[in-house]
Image (spheres, rainbow, N blue to C red):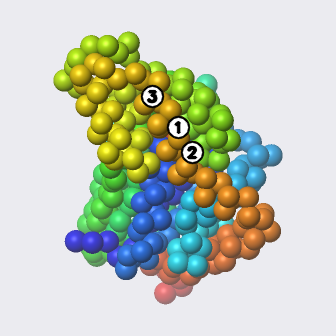
Amino acid sequence: MSATRIFSGIQPTGDLHLGNYFGAVRNWVALQEGAADTIYCVVDYHAITGGIDADVLPERALQLAGDLVACGIDPERSILFVQSHVPEHTELAWVFNAFAAFGDLSRMTQFKDKSGRAKHVSSGLFTYPVLQAADILLYLSDGVPVGEDQSQHLELTRSIARRFNQVVGEDYFPDVQTLLTEGKRIMSLADPERKMSKSLGDKHYVGLMEPPKRIAKKIRSAVTDAGGEARDELSPGVANLVGLLRLAGEHAAADQYAEEAKRGDLLYGHLKVAVADAVVAMLEPFQERRAQLSNADLRDLLADGASRASAIAKPVMEDVRRLIGVGARSINR
Ligand code: AQP
């Protein structure tokens, strides 16, 4: 069944990169063409689970919103807003803490991965997927376009919704579908066994707004294999580069390079130049559009987005309070 309302979010923790774009944002843009409502959110309350930086967070949120518009998110067709501007997100997350199973949260691989790397492991990092469930269900959304790394979190969203419905005895929240794409898991350039991720460091990702020369340099430095030997399967680094070439629209060249790599007679330098050229060409219109956007315009469109999001969120939160017996209306009944 196709979704009727799409929701997805992204953290303002740094540069928007090719993993975010091919895994999620490109699909966000495509879904605007369909019949479903589309709601996209810069999730700043998620970002603080990895550390607080009050001086840079508002700037990053604004910058990310601008990058999303530059990539094709249309703030008229979609609702684009910042999570903390609609306080019902955190209120519903607290409610969902009563419905999420501790055992389920303990199994989240993203928590295990990120907590292993963090100096201070906040409990917010642990309950992150509960806030994510609240983000989605606050809009009664039933379709969530994300990268594969989020599939486990969406399974938890489904469990929370089902448990809520069962406890309150009403089919209130929908079952959400995970909407994945061909680019559901883009790997790091410097360590192709791991997903492309900005927290791994600068050399691991390509930012969408990076200057072309820097993009070409990063791709030139991508880890491959020694080459020169026939193989049945491409090594992870080469498969990632071929995949990027295909996603950037060069299907025939990607097939050809894959064949040559399997035969063992591909010079990886040629593949890297082709990938860099295709990625730079794909990003050029985004970078041009980004340069036209002013912060004043972005602030206005985010304010409008927050008020449209609130109009959906407030009545849902009112229903939730009533269904679980909290809030002034419940006591005054
Ligand atoms: N490598 C990836 N391949 C495919 N999809 C990806 N996404 C992230 N990395 C990849 C998808 O992008 C959307 C936004 O995710 P996010 O806000 O959680 O971003 P992120 O995971 O924080 O991105 P990073 O770079 O991996 O951040 P850090 O390093 O801070 O963890 C999601 O739909 C996600 O699946």
- Image vertical order of residue 269 relative to residue 132, above or below: above
The answer to whether the beta carbon of the residue marked 2 is less than 8 Å from any atom of ligand 1 is no
> What residue is disc 2 on?
280
Question: Residue 270, labelled with which disc?
Answer: 3
Question: Residue 276, labelled with which disc?
Answer: 1
Q: Would residue 300 appear left or right of 30 to someone viewing this image?
A: right
Work out whether residue 109 or residue 265 is closer to the camera in this orientation and state it.
265
Work out whether residue 235 or residue 102 is closer to the camera in this orientation and state it.
235
Q: Answer yes or no: do the residues labelled 2 and 1 have beta carbons within 8 Å?
A: yes
What amino acid type should be assigned to the residue bearing mark 2?
Answer: Val
- Mark-to-mark CA distance, 1 and 3: 10 Å
Instruction: Please give the name of the residue rendered at 49% of the width and 87% of the height, measured from the top-left corner.
Output: 333
Q: What percent of the width, then of the height, locates residue 259?
A: 25, 31
Judged by depth in the image, the label closer to the viewer, 3 or 2, is: 3
What amino acid type should be assigned to the residue bearing mark 1?
Answer: Ala
Local crowd size for mark 2, using a 10 Å CA cut-off: few (<14), some (14–19), many (≥20): many
Q: Would residue 266 appear left or right of 76 to someone viewing this image?
A: left
What amino acid type should be assigned to the residue bearing mark 3?
Answer: His
- Please, what secondary structure does the residue beneath circle 2 have? helix
- Mark-to-mark CA distance, 2 and 1: 6 Å
Judged by depth in the image, the label closer to the viewer, 1 or 3, is: 3
Q: Earlier in the sequence, mark 3 or mark 2?
A: 3
Q: Would residue 298 be seen by someone viewing this image from the given angle? A: yes
Q: What percent of the width, then of the height, locates residue 218?
A: 58, 29
- Please, what secondary structure does the residue beneath circle 1 have? helix
Instruction: Please give the name of the residue rendered at 42% of the width and 66% of the height, measured from the top-left corner.
Output: 30
